[in-house]
Image: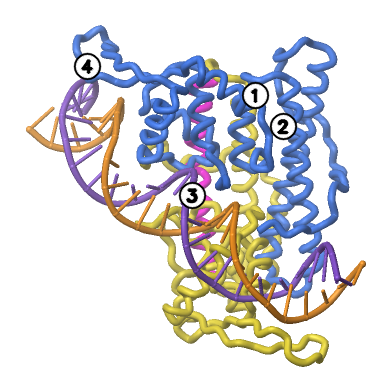
Chain colours: A blue, B yellow, C orange, D purple
DNA sequence: GTTAGCATGTAAGGAGTTACATGATTTT
DNA sequence: AAAATCATGTAACTCCTTACATGCTAAC
Protein backbone atom coordinates (compact mmCIF):
# COMPACT_ATOMS: atom_id res chain seq x y z
CA UNK A 1 0.00 0.00 0.00
CA UNK A 2 2.96 2.35 0.32
CA UNK A 3 4.37 4.38 -2.52
CA UNK A 4 8.07 4.83 -2.89
CA UNK A 5 8.47 6.61 0.36
CA UNK A 6 6.92 9.17 2.57
CA UNK A 7 10.36 10.54 2.88
CA UNK A 8 9.11 13.94 3.88
CA UNK A 9 7.36 13.09 7.12
CA UNK A 10 10.28 11.37 8.84
CA UNK A 11 12.61 14.09 7.63
CA UNK A 12 10.43 16.81 9.12
CA UNK A 13 10.02 14.99 12.40
CA UNK A 14 13.74 14.32 12.57
CA UNK A 15 14.67 17.92 12.00
CA UNK A 16 12.10 19.21 14.46
CA UNK A 17 13.47 16.83 17.03
CA UNK A 18 16.85 18.48 16.68
CA UNK A 19 15.30 21.90 17.18
CA UNK A 20 11.95 23.67 16.74
CA UNK A 21 11.62 25.67 13.52
CA UNK A 22 9.15 27.44 11.29
CA UNK A 23 8.18 26.17 7.84
CA UNK A 24 10.36 28.39 5.73
CA UNK A 25 13.50 27.46 7.61
CA UNK A 26 12.55 23.80 7.65
CA UNK A 27 12.39 23.78 3.89
CA UNK A 28 15.96 24.95 3.50
CA UNK A 29 17.30 22.38 5.95
CA UNK A 30 15.14 19.73 4.32
CA UNK A 31 16.70 20.30 0.92
CA UNK A 32 20.04 19.32 2.38
CA UNK A 33 18.89 16.27 4.30
CA UNK A 34 16.94 14.97 1.32
CA UNK A 35 20.24 14.81 -0.46
CA UNK A 36 19.84 15.25 -4.14
CA UNK A 37 18.83 18.86 -3.89
CA UNK A 38 15.47 18.38 -5.41
CA UNK A 39 14.17 21.73 -4.21
CA UNK A 40 11.24 20.75 -2.06
CA UNK A 41 8.22 22.94 -2.69
CA UNK A 42 6.01 24.70 -0.19
CA UNK A 43 3.13 22.97 -1.86
CA UNK A 44 4.37 19.75 -0.26
CA UNK A 45 5.71 21.12 2.96
CA UNK A 46 2.81 23.10 4.39
CA UNK A 47 0.09 20.51 3.76
CA UNK A 48 2.38 17.94 5.35
CA UNK A 49 2.93 20.11 8.42
CA UNK A 50 -0.82 20.61 8.63
CA UNK A 51 -1.49 16.89 8.61
CA UNK A 52 1.21 16.29 11.22
CA UNK A 53 -0.49 18.81 13.48
CA UNK A 54 -3.83 17.08 12.94
CA UNK A 55 -2.33 13.77 13.97
CA UNK A 56 -0.90 15.49 17.02
CA UNK A 57 2.73 14.67 16.33
CA UNK A 58 3.78 18.27 16.13
CA UNK A 59 2.32 21.49 17.39
CA UNK A 60 2.69 24.98 16.01
CA UNK A 61 2.87 28.13 18.07
CA UNK A 62 2.75 31.63 16.61
CA UNK A 63 5.83 33.50 17.65
CA UNK A 64 6.28 37.20 17.21
CA UNK A 65 10.02 37.12 16.94
CA UNK A 66 11.86 40.40 16.73
CA UNK A 67 15.33 39.52 15.50
CA UNK A 68 17.03 42.91 15.87
CA UNK A 69 14.99 43.72 18.96
CA UNK A 70 12.48 45.66 16.86
CA UNK A 71 8.78 45.38 17.64
CA UNK A 72 5.95 43.57 15.84
CA UNK A 73 7.14 41.44 12.97
CA UNK A 74 4.73 39.20 11.19
CA UNK A 75 3.99 36.10 13.20
CA UNK A 76 5.89 32.96 12.20
CA UNK A 77 4.62 29.56 13.18
CA UNK A 78 7.26 27.66 15.04
CA UNK A 79 6.69 23.92 15.06
CA UNK A 80 7.90 21.43 17.65
CA UNK A 81 7.39 17.76 18.41
CA UNK A 82 4.73 16.71 20.87
CA UNK A 83 5.26 13.79 23.27
CA UNK A 84 3.33 11.59 20.84
CA UNK A 85 5.49 12.85 18.01
CA UNK A 86 8.71 11.94 19.80
CA UNK A 87 7.44 8.46 20.44
CA UNK A 88 6.32 8.05 16.85
CA UNK A 89 9.65 9.29 15.52
CA UNK A 90 11.51 6.71 17.56
CA UNK A 91 9.29 3.99 16.12
CA UNK A 92 9.79 5.20 12.57
CA UNK A 93 13.56 5.47 12.90
CA UNK A 94 13.83 2.00 14.42
CA UNK A 95 11.40 0.24 12.07
CA UNK A 96 12.63 -1.42 8.93
CA UNK A 97 10.73 -2.78 5.95
CA UNK A 98 11.60 -3.37 2.30
CA UNK A 99 11.19 0.34 1.55
CA UNK A 100 13.74 1.28 4.24
CA UNK A 101 16.67 0.18 2.08
CA UNK A 102 15.86 2.33 -0.91
CA UNK A 103 17.99 5.38 -1.63
CA UNK A 104 16.04 8.26 -0.20
CA UNK A 105 14.54 6.37 2.70
CA UNK A 106 17.95 5.17 3.73
CA UNK A 107 19.42 8.67 3.46
CA UNK A 108 16.79 10.05 5.81
CA UNK A 109 17.26 7.24 8.31
CA UNK A 110 21.00 7.71 8.17
CA UNK A 111 20.81 11.47 8.63
CA UNK A 112 19.10 10.90 11.97
CA UNK A 113 21.27 8.06 13.21
CA UNK A 114 22.29 10.32 16.05
CA UNK A 115 18.79 9.87 17.46
CA UNK A 116 18.93 6.06 17.53
CA UNK A 117 20.92 3.33 19.24
CA UNK A 118 23.89 1.40 17.84
CA UNK A 119 21.78 -1.74 17.45
CA UNK A 120 19.37 -0.03 15.07
CA UNK A 121 22.12 1.71 13.17
CA UNK A 122 23.86 -1.57 12.49
CA UNK A 123 20.66 -3.24 11.38
CA UNK A 124 19.88 -0.48 8.92
CA UNK A 125 23.40 -0.28 7.54
CA UNK A 126 23.43 -4.03 6.96
CA UNK A 127 20.00 -4.02 5.38
CA UNK A 128 21.09 -1.30 3.02
CA UNK A 129 24.24 -3.23 2.19
CA UNK A 130 22.25 -6.33 1.33
CA UNK A 131 19.97 -4.30 -0.89
CA UNK A 132 22.94 -2.83 -2.74
CA UNK A 133 24.62 -6.18 -3.30
CA UNK A 134 21.37 -7.42 -4.77
CA UNK A 135 21.52 -4.54 -7.19
CA UNK A 136 25.08 -5.37 -8.06
CA UNK A 137 24.06 -8.91 -8.87
CA UNK A 138 21.25 -7.75 -11.13
CA UNK A 139 23.48 -5.32 -12.99
CA UNK A 140 26.31 -7.81 -13.38
CA UNK A 141 24.01 -10.47 -14.73
CA UNK A 142 22.39 -8.29 -17.33
CA UNK A 143 25.84 -7.02 -18.11
CA UNK A 144 27.08 -10.50 -18.85
CA UNK A 145 23.94 -11.47 -20.74
CA UNK A 146 23.66 -8.48 -23.05
CA UNK A 147 27.17 -7.11 -23.34
CA UNK A 148 27.51 -7.93 -27.03
CA UNK A 149 24.29 -6.60 -28.45
CA UNK A 150 24.34 -3.39 -26.43
CA UNK A 151 24.97 0.18 -27.46
CA UNK A 152 28.33 1.53 -26.31
CA UNK A 153 26.90 4.48 -24.44
CA UNK A 154 24.31 2.36 -22.67
CA UNK A 155 27.15 0.07 -21.71
CA UNK A 156 29.25 2.93 -20.39
CA UNK A 157 26.30 4.20 -18.37
CA UNK A 158 25.92 0.84 -16.74
CA UNK A 159 29.63 0.41 -16.13
CA UNK A 160 29.59 3.75 -14.36
CA UNK A 161 26.46 2.85 -12.39
CA UNK A 162 28.08 -0.38 -11.30
CA UNK A 163 31.15 1.49 -10.10
CA UNK A 164 29.07 3.93 -8.08
CA UNK A 165 27.20 1.14 -6.34
CA UNK A 166 30.43 -0.71 -5.63
CA UNK A 167 31.84 2.42 -4.08
CA UNK A 168 28.76 2.84 -1.95
CA UNK A 169 29.10 -0.71 -0.66
CA UNK A 170 32.67 0.00 0.40
CA UNK A 171 31.48 3.15 2.13
CA UNK A 172 28.92 1.11 4.05
CA UNK A 173 31.56 -1.45 4.96
CA UNK A 174 33.58 1.28 6.60
CA UNK A 175 30.58 2.52 8.53
CA UNK A 176 29.61 -0.99 9.61
CA UNK A 177 33.12 -1.73 10.87
CA UNK A 178 32.99 1.50 12.77
CA UNK A 179 29.64 0.73 14.41
CA UNK A 180 30.82 -2.75 15.37
CA UNK A 181 33.86 -1.19 16.96
CA UNK A 182 31.70 1.23 18.88
CA UNK A 183 29.47 -1.50 20.15
CA UNK A 184 32.35 -3.59 21.42
CA UNK A 185 34.34 -0.87 23.09
CA UNK A 186 31.91 1.83 24.10
CA UNK A 187 28.41 2.01 25.60
CA UNK A 188 26.63 3.68 22.66
CA UNK A 189 26.45 6.80 20.54
CA UNK A 190 29.99 8.06 21.04
CA UNK A 191 32.79 8.36 18.54
CA UNK A 192 32.92 9.63 15.01
CA UNK A 193 31.25 7.74 12.19
CA UNK A 194 34.04 8.56 9.72
CA UNK A 195 34.07 6.04 6.91
CA UNK A 196 36.22 3.50 5.15
CA UNK A 197 39.89 3.54 5.88
CA UNK A 198 39.73 0.03 4.49
CA UNK A 199 41.27 0.09 1.01
CA UNK A 200 39.24 -2.99 0.03
CA UNK A 201 39.97 -2.95 -3.69
CA UNK A 202 38.59 -6.47 -4.04
CA UNK A 203 35.53 -7.19 -6.10
CA UNK A 204 33.64 -9.85 -4.17
CA UNK A 205 30.91 -8.00 -2.39
CA UNK A 206 29.12 -11.08 -1.08
CA UNK A 207 27.18 -13.65 -3.11
CA UNK A 208 23.78 -12.87 -1.55
CA UNK A 209 20.98 -14.05 -3.84
CA UNK A 210 21.46 -15.09 -7.40
CA UNK A 211 17.78 -15.21 -8.22
CA UNK A 212 16.59 -12.41 -10.42
CA UNK A 213 13.09 -12.26 -9.08
CA UNK A 214 10.56 -10.02 -10.68
CA UNK A 215 9.32 -7.32 -8.41
CA UNK A 216 6.41 -5.61 -10.14
CA UNK B 1 4.43 23.01 -16.67
CA UNK B 2 6.54 19.87 -16.67
CA UNK B 3 6.96 17.67 -13.66
CA UNK B 4 10.31 16.17 -12.81
CA UNK B 5 10.46 14.22 -16.02
CA UNK B 6 8.46 12.15 -18.32
CA UNK B 7 11.40 9.83 -18.32
CA UNK B 8 9.34 6.91 -19.46
CA UNK B 9 8.25 8.16 -22.85
CA UNK B 10 11.71 8.97 -24.26
CA UNK B 11 13.05 5.72 -22.84
CA UNK B 12 10.36 3.70 -24.58
CA UNK B 13 10.83 5.51 -27.88
CA UNK B 14 14.59 5.13 -27.66
CA UNK B 15 14.40 1.40 -27.03
CA UNK B 16 11.85 0.85 -29.76
CA UNK B 17 14.10 2.73 -32.13
CA UNK B 18 16.83 0.20 -31.47
CA UNK B 19 14.44 -2.65 -32.20
CA UNK B 20 10.70 -3.41 -32.12
CA UNK B 21 9.51 -5.16 -29.00
CA UNK B 22 6.43 -6.15 -27.04
CA UNK B 23 5.50 -4.63 -23.69
CA UNK B 24 6.74 -7.33 -21.39
CA UNK B 25 10.19 -7.36 -22.94
CA UNK B 26 10.29 -3.55 -23.00
CA UNK B 27 9.76 -3.45 -19.28
CA UNK B 28 12.81 -5.55 -18.53
CA UNK B 29 15.06 -3.52 -20.79
CA UNK B 30 13.57 -0.34 -19.34
CA UNK B 31 14.54 -1.28 -15.82
CA UNK B 32 18.16 -1.29 -16.90
CA UNK B 33 18.10 1.93 -18.89
CA UNK B 34 16.31 3.77 -16.12
CA UNK B 35 19.30 3.05 -13.98
CA UNK B 36 18.41 2.78 -10.36
CA UNK B 37 16.48 -0.41 -10.79
CA UNK B 38 13.22 0.99 -9.63
CA UNK B 39 11.18 -1.88 -11.03
CA UNK B 40 8.89 -0.14 -13.46
CA UNK B 41 5.33 -1.38 -13.17
CA UNK B 42 2.97 -2.50 -15.91
CA UNK B 43 0.56 -0.02 -14.49
CA UNK B 44 2.76 2.72 -15.91
CA UNK B 45 4.00 0.97 -19.01
CA UNK B 46 0.85 -0.15 -20.75
CA UNK B 47 -1.08 3.10 -20.37
CA UNK B 48 1.98 4.93 -21.67
CA UNK B 49 2.19 2.64 -24.71
CA UNK B 50 -1.49 3.21 -25.30
CA UNK B 51 -1.09 6.98 -25.29
CA UNK B 52 1.92 6.76 -27.61
CA UNK B 53 -0.18 4.78 -30.07
CA UNK B 54 -2.92 7.37 -29.85
CA UNK B 55 -0.46 10.13 -30.67
CA UNK B 56 0.73 8.04 -33.59
CA UNK B 57 4.36 7.84 -32.51
CA UNK B 58 4.35 4.07 -32.26
CA UNK B 59 2.18 1.37 -33.74
CA UNK B 60 1.41 -2.06 -32.36
CA UNK B 61 0.92 -5.17 -34.43
CA UNK B 62 -0.30 -8.48 -33.06
CA UNK B 63 2.25 -11.13 -33.81
CA UNK B 64 1.63 -14.83 -33.41
CA UNK B 65 5.23 -15.72 -32.74
CA UNK B 66 6.10 -19.38 -32.44
CA UNK B 67 9.55 -19.44 -30.89
CA UNK B 68 10.28 -23.15 -31.13
CA UNK B 69 8.39 -23.47 -34.43
CA UNK B 70 5.27 -24.58 -32.57
CA UNK B 71 1.88 -23.33 -33.72
CA UNK B 72 -0.50 -20.79 -32.16
CA UNK B 73 0.96 -19.03 -29.21
CA UNK B 74 -0.95 -16.26 -27.62
CA UNK B 75 -0.66 -13.07 -29.66
CA UNK B 76 1.87 -10.58 -28.39
CA UNK B 77 1.70 -6.97 -29.41
CA UNK B 78 4.96 -5.89 -30.96
CA UNK B 79 5.45 -2.15 -30.99
CA UNK B 80 7.57 -0.14 -33.40
CA UNK B 81 8.18 3.52 -34.15
CA UNK B 82 6.18 5.25 -36.85
CA UNK B 83 7.77 7.87 -39.12
CA UNK B 84 6.28 10.56 -36.88
CA UNK B 85 7.70 8.77 -33.88
CA UNK B 86 11.20 8.71 -35.30
CA UNK B 87 11.05 12.41 -36.01
CA UNK B 88 9.71 13.16 -32.55
CA UNK B 89 12.40 11.06 -30.89
CA UNK B 90 15.13 13.00 -32.69
CA UNK B 91 13.61 16.24 -31.46
CA UNK B 92 13.38 14.99 -27.89
CA UNK B 93 16.94 13.66 -27.82
CA UNK B 94 18.34 16.90 -29.25
CA UNK B 95 16.25 19.29 -27.15
CA UNK B 96 17.56 20.60 -23.86
CA UNK B 97 15.82 22.49 -21.09
CA UNK B 98 16.39 22.83 -17.33
CA UNK B 99 14.89 19.41 -16.72
CA UNK B 100 17.35 17.76 -19.11
CA UNK B 101 20.22 18.03 -16.65
CA UNK B 102 18.53 16.23 -13.79
CA UNK B 103 19.63 12.71 -12.90
CA UNK B 104 17.12 10.47 -14.58
CA UNK B 105 16.52 12.67 -17.61
CA UNK B 106 20.23 12.85 -18.24
CA UNK B 107 20.62 9.09 -17.89
CA UNK B 108 17.98 8.45 -20.52
CA UNK B 109 19.47 11.00 -22.92
CA UNK B 110 22.89 9.50 -22.38
CA UNK B 111 21.72 5.94 -22.92
CA UNK B 112 20.59 6.92 -26.41
CA UNK B 113 23.59 9.02 -27.36
CA UNK B 114 24.24 6.53 -30.13
CA UNK B 115 21.18 7.91 -31.87
CA UNK B 116 22.39 11.54 -31.86
CA UNK B 117 25.26 13.57 -33.31
CA UNK B 118 28.48 14.62 -31.59
CA UNK B 119 27.30 18.23 -31.36
CA UNK B 120 24.27 17.29 -29.31
CA UNK B 121 26.20 14.88 -27.13
CA UNK B 122 28.71 17.55 -26.21
CA UNK B 123 25.99 20.07 -25.42
CA UNK B 124 24.21 17.66 -23.12
CA UNK B 125 27.36 16.51 -21.36
CA UNK B 126 28.37 20.10 -20.71
CA UNK B 127 24.92 21.08 -19.53
CA UNK B 128 24.97 18.21 -17.09
CA UNK B 129 28.41 19.18 -15.91
CA UNK B 130 27.28 22.73 -15.22
CA UNK B 131 24.31 21.44 -13.28
CA UNK B 132 26.54 19.24 -11.14
CA UNK B 133 29.02 21.99 -10.37
CA UNK B 134 26.10 24.13 -9.24
CA UNK B 135 25.19 21.34 -6.86
CA UNK B 136 28.74 21.15 -5.58
CA UNK B 137 28.66 24.86 -4.84
CA UNK B 138 25.42 24.54 -2.93
CA UNK B 139 26.67 21.64 -0.87
CA UNK B 140 30.03 23.23 -0.14
CA UNK B 141 28.41 26.45 0.99
CA UNK B 142 25.99 24.82 3.38
CA UNK B 143 28.86 22.66 4.52
CA UNK B 144 30.93 25.68 5.43
CA UNK B 145 28.00 27.52 6.97
CA UNK B 146 26.65 24.77 9.21
CA UNK B 147 29.58 22.47 9.85
CA UNK B 148 29.75 23.22 13.56
CA UNK B 149 26.15 22.86 14.61
CA UNK B 150 25.53 19.73 12.58
CA UNK B 151 25.03 16.13 13.60
CA UNK B 152 27.98 13.87 12.79
CA UNK B 153 25.99 11.42 10.74
CA UNK B 154 24.31 14.15 8.73
CA UNK B 155 27.77 15.54 8.12
CA UNK B 156 29.11 12.19 6.98
CA UNK B 157 26.15 11.76 4.65
CA UNK B 158 26.89 15.08 3.04
CA UNK B 159 30.60 14.44 2.82
CA UNK B 160 29.82 11.22 1.00
CA UNK B 161 27.31 12.93 -1.26
CA UNK B 162 29.87 15.57 -2.13
CA UNK B 163 32.39 12.90 -3.03
CA UNK B 164 29.94 11.10 -5.28
CA UNK B 165 29.11 14.28 -7.18
CA UNK B 166 32.81 15.16 -7.51
CA UNK B 167 33.42 11.73 -8.96
CA UNK B 168 30.60 12.15 -11.40
CA UNK B 169 32.04 15.46 -12.60
CA UNK B 170 35.37 13.75 -13.29
CA UNK B 171 33.54 11.03 -15.19
CA UNK B 172 31.86 13.68 -17.32
CA UNK B 173 35.20 15.39 -17.92
CA UNK B 174 36.56 12.19 -19.37
CA UNK B 175 33.55 11.79 -21.63
CA UNK B 176 33.71 15.41 -22.76
CA UNK B 177 37.40 15.13 -23.61
CA UNK B 178 36.57 12.05 -25.56
CA UNK B 179 33.77 13.68 -27.53
CA UNK B 180 35.97 16.67 -28.31
CA UNK B 181 38.63 14.31 -29.60
CA UNK B 182 36.10 12.55 -31.77
CA UNK B 183 34.88 15.79 -33.23
CA UNK B 184 38.37 16.92 -34.17
CA UNK B 185 39.66 13.71 -35.64
CA UNK B 186 36.67 11.81 -36.94
CA UNK B 187 33.44 12.63 -38.82
CA UNK B 188 30.95 11.60 -36.11
CA UNK B 189 29.63 8.70 -34.10
CA UNK B 190 32.69 6.45 -34.29
CA UNK B 191 35.00 5.37 -31.54
CA UNK B 192 34.42 4.18 -28.04
CA UNK B 193 33.06 6.48 -25.34
CA UNK B 194 35.22 4.90 -22.64
CA UNK B 195 35.65 7.34 -19.80
CA UNK B 196 38.30 9.17 -17.86
CA UNK B 197 41.82 8.01 -18.32
CA UNK B 198 42.58 11.41 -16.90
CA UNK B 199 43.63 10.89 -13.28
CA UNK B 200 42.52 14.45 -12.43
CA UNK B 201 42.73 14.17 -8.66
CA UNK B 202 42.39 17.94 -8.33
CA UNK B 203 39.48 19.51 -6.56
CA UNK B 204 38.67 22.67 -8.51
CA UNK B 205 35.66 21.81 -10.57
CA UNK B 206 35.00 25.33 -11.88
CA UNK B 207 33.59 28.27 -9.95
CA UNK B 208 30.38 28.59 -11.99
CA UNK B 209 27.76 30.54 -10.07
CA UNK B 210 28.01 31.45 -6.45
CA UNK B 211 24.44 32.59 -6.12
CA UNK B 212 22.25 30.30 -4.10
CA UNK B 213 18.98 31.10 -5.83
CA UNK B 214 15.77 29.73 -4.52
CA UNK B 215 14.06 27.37 -6.89
CA UNK B 216 10.68 26.54 -5.41
C1' DG C 1 10.25 53.26 -3.85
C1' DT C 2 11.10 49.19 -5.86
C1' DT C 3 13.47 44.94 -5.96
C1' DA C 4 14.81 40.88 -3.28
C1' DG C 5 13.98 37.84 0.32
C1' DC C 6 11.05 36.21 4.27
C1' DA C 7 6.82 33.75 5.34
C1' DT C 8 2.43 31.03 4.71
C1' DG C 9 -0.64 28.93 2.27
C1' DT C 10 -4.35 26.60 -1.70
C1' DA C 11 -5.91 24.17 -6.10
C1' DA C 12 -5.06 21.46 -9.91
C1' DG C 13 -2.60 18.12 -11.89
C1' DG C 14 1.43 14.86 -13.38
C1' DA C 15 4.13 10.73 -13.11
C1' DG C 16 4.25 6.88 -11.21
C1' DT C 17 2.78 2.99 -7.75
C1' DT C 18 0.09 -0.96 -5.81
C1' DA C 19 -3.39 -4.06 -6.07
C1' DC C 20 -6.37 -6.38 -8.81
C1' DA C 21 -7.90 -9.19 -12.82
C1' DT C 22 -7.12 -12.56 -16.47
C1' DG C 23 -5.29 -16.03 -19.18
C1' DA C 24 -1.58 -18.65 -21.97
C1' DT C 25 2.73 -21.29 -21.84
C1' DT C 26 6.71 -23.52 -19.97
C1' DT C 27 9.05 -25.98 -16.49
C1' DT C 28 9.22 -29.19 -12.64
C1' DA D 1 -1.06 -31.28 -12.05
C1' DA D 2 1.20 -27.56 -9.79
C1' DA D 3 4.28 -23.76 -9.92
C1' DA D 4 6.70 -20.39 -12.33
C1' DT D 5 6.96 -17.17 -15.81
C1' DC D 6 5.15 -14.94 -19.93
C1' DA D 7 1.87 -11.50 -21.32
C1' DT D 8 -1.66 -7.70 -21.14
C1' DG D 9 -4.27 -4.74 -19.01
C1' DT D 10 -7.52 -1.42 -15.41
C1' DA D 11 -8.79 1.41 -11.16
C1' DA D 12 -7.67 3.70 -7.29
C1' DC D 13 -4.43 6.06 -5.04
C1' DT D 14 0.07 8.62 -3.32
C1' DC D 15 3.47 11.71 -3.19
C1' DC D 16 4.99 15.51 -4.91
C1' DT D 17 5.10 19.56 -8.29
C1' DT D 18 3.67 23.84 -10.60
C1' DA D 19 1.23 27.74 -10.60
C1' DC D 20 -1.26 30.83 -8.13
C1' DA D 21 -2.39 33.99 -4.18
C1' DT D 22 -1.05 37.03 -0.36
C1' DG D 23 1.45 40.07 2.52
C1' DC D 24 5.38 41.57 5.40
C1' DT D 25 10.24 43.31 5.81
C1' DA D 26 15.09 44.45 4.58
C1' DA D 27 18.26 46.47 1.45
C1' DC D 28 19.70 49.24 -2.43
The residue tagged 1 is A113
**Dot label at residue A197:** none
Task: Judge from the rendering whether residue A75 lies leftward or rightward of residue A204; answer left or right.
Answer: left
**Dot label at residue A73:** 4
Is the C-beta separation of discs 2 and 3 under 8 Å?
A: no
Q: Is residue A93 above or below residue C27?
A: above
The residue tagged 2 is A124
Answer whether residue B128 is magenta in the image. yes
Q: Is residue B207 above or below residue B119?
A: above
- Residue A202 percent across, percent down from the top left: 87, 43
Q: Nearer the viewer, residue B166 or A15?
A: A15
Q: Secondary structure at mark 2?
A: helix
Is the C-beta separation of discs 2 and 1 under 8 Å?
A: yes
Magenta region, residue range: B118-147
Residue at x-position 36% and y-position 28%: A24
Query: How far is mark 2 from mark 1, CA to CA?
Result: 10 Å
Task: Judge from the rendering whether residue B215 lies leftward or rightward of residue B67; answer left or right.
Answer: left
Counting other residues with Cα less than 10 Å from the Cα at mark 4, is it few (<14), some (14-19), or many (20 or more)? few
Query: How far is mark 1 from mark 3, CA to CA?
Result: 33 Å
**Chain of the residue displaying label 2:** A
Amino acid sequence: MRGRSDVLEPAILGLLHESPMHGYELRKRLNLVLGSFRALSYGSLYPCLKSLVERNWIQGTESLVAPQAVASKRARIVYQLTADGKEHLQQVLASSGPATWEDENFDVRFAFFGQTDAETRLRILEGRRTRLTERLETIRQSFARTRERMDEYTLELQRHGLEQVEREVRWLDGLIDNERGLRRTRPAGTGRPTAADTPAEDDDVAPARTTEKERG
